[in-house]
Amino acid sequence: MTTHFVHDTCVLLRRSLRHVSRSLDTVITTTIMPIAFMLLFVYVFGGAISSGTTSYVNYLLPGILLITVASGVSYTAFRLFLDMKSGIFERFHSMPISRSSVLWAHVLTSLVANLVSLTVVVLVAVLLGFRSAAGVTAYFAVAGLLVLFTLALTWIAVIPGLTAQSPDGVSAFSYPLVFLPFVSSAFVPTRTMPAAVRAFAQHQPVTSVVNAMRDLLTRQPVGSSVWIAAAWLLGVLVVAYAGAILTYRRRIS
């Protein structure tokens, strides 16, 4: 059964990746917006923001990486929506394939596409002056958090991809995800925020993830922050996965 699932997922993954490779404008679009934000904050707002570090781009990068993922998963929802409306799901279900492999192919395609976008954004950050003396273990930890973040948001994106009634509806869900890093420690220290905003910012998952990634990249004492961030992401991932599978079963039943 497991072999059957893996084989079907790989076949459908190749199909999805071919679609992405034929429309590279989607990857380019999801990369341009975070880069534009990075340029704006570094060269326009950076001089007025006191981050307590010598390089604002070092402070900024973790939040930009999360925005890159948040903007990228919206295309996963859109591709899933198109498959639902085109009737390709019904065709897949008439074949002897694992039903969950259809969703997993979209999710893994999102992971691959987002990793490409993240790599481009990091390279641009290096050109802007980003430097890190972090070791290999720290980089692996940052990569692990980004993978968990991508999977969690992608499984959230699956739900509107399955249930939306229009292209505008399927795209709208991503706006809160892109906005959330702005109400966190991604761009300014939370201590500078008004009390009510600061309380929300300090206790939402993006702040935990950003702080953990920033400490890892700047070789600061991490303590329990990386485990708190991982716990947040795993919790969201489990809930989103359960919700997506339940929604999928209702749609195909």
Image (tube, rainbow, N blue to C red):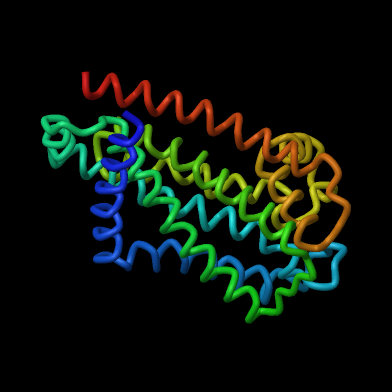
Q: In the rendered image, which quarter is residue 8 located in?
A: top left
Residue 171 against residue 232 in the figure, above or below:
below
Residue lying farthest to the bottom in this orientation: 127
Q: Nearer the viewer, residue 73 or 184?
A: 73
Which percent across, then down, holds residue 131?
A: 74, 74
Quarter of the N terminus within the rendering = top left
Instruction: Residue at 34% x, 24% y: name it.
Output: 247
Q: In the rendered image, which quarter is residue 100 located in?
A: top left
Q: In the rendered image, which quarter is residue 56 located in?
A: bottom right
Which percent across, then down, holds residue 59?
A: 75, 63
Instruction: Residue at 43% x, 56% y: name it.
Output: 112
Which percent across, then down, holds residue 248?
A: 31, 26
Instruction: Residue at 35% x, 32% y: name it.
Output: 2
Give the total of numbered labels. Answer: 0
Q: Nearer the viewer, residue 194 or 95?
A: 95
Which percent across, then down, holds residue 70?
A: 50, 50
User: Horizontal placement of 4 versus 202: left or right?
Assistant: left
Q: Nearer the viewer, residue 225 or 10?
A: 10
Q: Nearer the viewer, residue 81 or 197?
A: 81
Residue 30 against residue 162 in the figure, above or below:
below
Quarter of the C terminus within the rendering = top left
